[in-house]
Image (cartoon, rainbow, N blue to C red):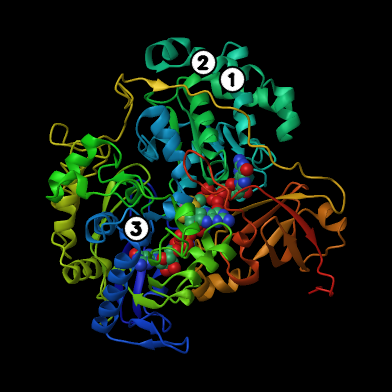
Amino acid sequence: MTLTTTPDGVRVEGREFPTNRGGLCRKGWTAAELLDRPDRLGTPLLRTEDGTFEPVGWDVALTRWVRELRAARATHGADAVGVFGGASLTNEKAYALGKFVRLGLGSSRVDYNGRFCMSSAAAAGNRSFGVDRGLPFPVTDLDDAHTVLLLGSNVADTMPPFVQHLAEARAAGGLLVVDPRRSATADLTADGQGTHLQPLPGTDLALLQGLAHVVLAEGLADHEYLAARTTGLAQLRPALNQWWPERVEAVTGVPAHRIREVARRLASDPRGTYVLTGRGVEQHADGTDTATAAINLALLLGLPGGERSGYGTLTGQGNGQGAREHGLKADQLPGYRSISDPADRAAVAAVWGVAPETIPGPGLPAVELLASLGRPGGVRCLWVNGSNIVVSAPDVAAVAAGLERLDFLVVSDFFFSETAAHADLVLPVRQWAEEEGTMTNLEGRVLRRRRAVAPPPGLVGELEIIAELARRLGVEGFTDDPREVFVELAAASAGGRADYSAITWDRLDAGEALHWPCRPSAPEGSPRLFLERFAHPDGRARLVPVGGPTRRPAPGPGPAGGLVLTTGRWLEHYQSGTQTRRVGSLAAARPEARLQVHPATAAARSIADGDVVEVTSAVGSALVRAELSTAVRPDTVFLPMHFGGEATANLLVEARTDPVSGMPDFKATAVTLRRPVAGGSA
Ligand SMILES: Nc1nc2c(c(=O)[nH]1)N[C@H]1C(S)=C(S)[C@@H](COP(=O)(O)OP(=O)(O)OC[C@H]3O[C@@H](n4cnc5c(=O)[nH]c(N)nc54)[C@H](O)[C@@H]3O)O[C@H]1N2
Ligand SMILES: Nc1nc2c(c(=O)[nH]1)N[C@H]1C(S)=C(S)[C@@H](COP(=O)(O)OP(=O)(O)OC[C@H]3O[C@@H](n4cnc5c(=O)[nH]c(N)nc54)[C@H](O)[C@@H]3O)O[C@H]1N2
Ligand SMILES: [Mo]
């Protein structure tokens, strides 16, 4: 998109671009409204003795912060200071922040909200393919697809410009949507344009095992491809044996004959067939295994690395791809390198001009990092930069308690978020349209972000904050010039999995489409990975045997019976809502949270549309109005994640995580539902 400055302010215009073709979702069209809002943070705010906030100058703010950092480190050690970042940050900020924690603070304690977003798909991609790039092919390849299996992704609401790439598949009757709700995307399958499968939340692993079982049992697998391009078929077979369709039906609720139909459709013509996953299947305690099962299915069919076929995961946040490549993750160094691998450490240490042993080891994944706040051996001084964790992390009551235990909390944001309310120091930062940098999109293509408007006076960006902190801490090697940071980032990525070493701002500014890896030996970049080989040393993809779904309490039918809560997004709001709840038209369209409940489920509990209901899980309760809808399964309820206060979805979600990726179990929580005793009718 482009920004035009007009006498009345800034306007957003769609721009012709292959991934969106001039389309923009509603949030994009309204984003400019946020640049000059009166409640935008303008100066640092420091908490006073009596608990209120007082505007202070930057020097006072940074002096205090540096004193707190030094005190925490002197008393409790370097790992007592930590950073929680976000994937809305540019590549340059993500890189600088990761480097600053390791070298400037000497701490291992850094992680970010991408842990909540793409970590399961990333872990599965690395395990199966040896590399993690959301789409290993340009999104426009989907334009010719006749069959697309879309698992746990509601693109019609969460990525509206993407829907146009599904037109051909819909015309061919081949859009296959797996979602416990008849979502806006599931509606796209109506009138013979495809099929909607509606499993119980958290049972996709069984469903995928069942589809793979049918492919093998009915002789639909591509054995020539499996022999040439994969390893592990012999180990995979026994893991699939037990998942015959009738058994899968009993676990998922999806009829056995539909499972067979979908498997046959997927195998009918591999050229033009794609398997895509979203958060609905990835944000589970078995999310890595579920994404792996989707990859196994795709491999059995011979899809990944084909001319016009493949597997991919649909990236979430603005820089969801880039932020997971440059070292913001607890176990990573730039170039998608491992912080535990001696060769990776040596390569980055050389670029940073330090001895490898100077770089700390792996830190803690997000949920463990948050659990450590204010605890013995845990983080005591935290900087949250680019996330609203009091709304978006699991078990938010525990997170808020952790923030209160801290010695010092710094939150930087454009707005006074729910998390900022817990801070000792709140710092204003610049917004997207006010800064230069790069982002990496869902297909691994690096894009320039250009400054379109001047930031309000007195506001600085994170690169300036980091460089100034480093200067005050007496650490060298930090610049506030984003172009210089990119040059260093590209050098640090050379030879890594996400190699940017032949990418320059000049090439990007000249309009070149550059997908990583992009190195001097192949400066044209890599729009299609895997055509010849996968990224494991032997060039083969791995079929990884996985088990059955994580056991959860089964929902009960009666009025007092348990239900499964799942959570996700609405078209009108973005993430924790800090931004979209402030946009007039969006807030008017969707002013408050609603719990989607099936009418039969509501009737059994004497709940009417609009009633305030109490939802209770093992860790907490939420109060929210019910919205009756036949679009959700009777044993399932759905709550959007966009709201704070009593309706915060994450009051209910437990801090249980996937053992491989550290992903929280956001999408299947056992709950009960009732009308609060003291009335509660709207
Ligand atoms: N409007 C809007 N757009 C956004 C965002 C936003 O907040 N608002 N956020 C952006 C970000 S960061 C992300 S990560 C993406 C997310 O994009 P999506 O992955 O599309 O978003 P979700 O709504 O979280 O989940 C998708 C679907 O999964 C379904 N689902 C829930 N549980 C299960 C399950 O157990 N199995 C299956 N098969 N499906 C399940 C939900 O019903 C939902 O329709 O969207 C991006 N775009
Ligand atoms: N129950 C449940 N919980 C979920 C999910 C779910 O589906 N269900 N989804 C998860 C997912 S996929 C995600 S991505 C997370 C998202 O949730 P969060 O991590 O909370 O993400 P945002 O709401 O985008 O928060 C970003 C905050 O940083 C600010 N911000 C934006 N850009 C910048 C910047 O450049 N610099 C600074 N300093 N601040 C900035 C914004 O104003 C906002 O307050 O939520 C996760 N939580
Ligand atoms: Mo996300």
Residue under circle 2?
235
Residue depth check, mark 3 versus mark 2: number of the one nearer the observer: 3
Residue depth check, mark 3 versus mark 1: number of the one nearer the observer: 3
Give the CA distance from mark 3 to mark 1: 41 Å
Across and down, in percent, residue 418 comes to 50, 72
**Crowd tier of the residue under label 2, counting other residues whose Cα lies within 10 Å: few below 14, some 14–19, many 20 or above:** few
- Residues at circles 2 and 1 in contact by the CB criterion of under 8 Å: yes
Residue drawn 32% across the image and 25% down it: 536
Residue under circle 3?
79
Which of the 4 quarters of the picture holds residue 528?
A: top left
**Tag 2 secondary structure:** helix
Tag 1: amino acid: Ala
Q: Is residue 82 left or right of residue 661?
A: left
| N-terminal-most mark, 3 or 1 | 3
Across and down, in percent, residue 415 comes to 42, 75
Residue drawn 38% across the image and 28% down it: 129
Q: Is residue 453 left or right of residue 291?
A: left
Residue under circle 1?
239
Residue 348's place in the image compared with 77, above or below, is: above
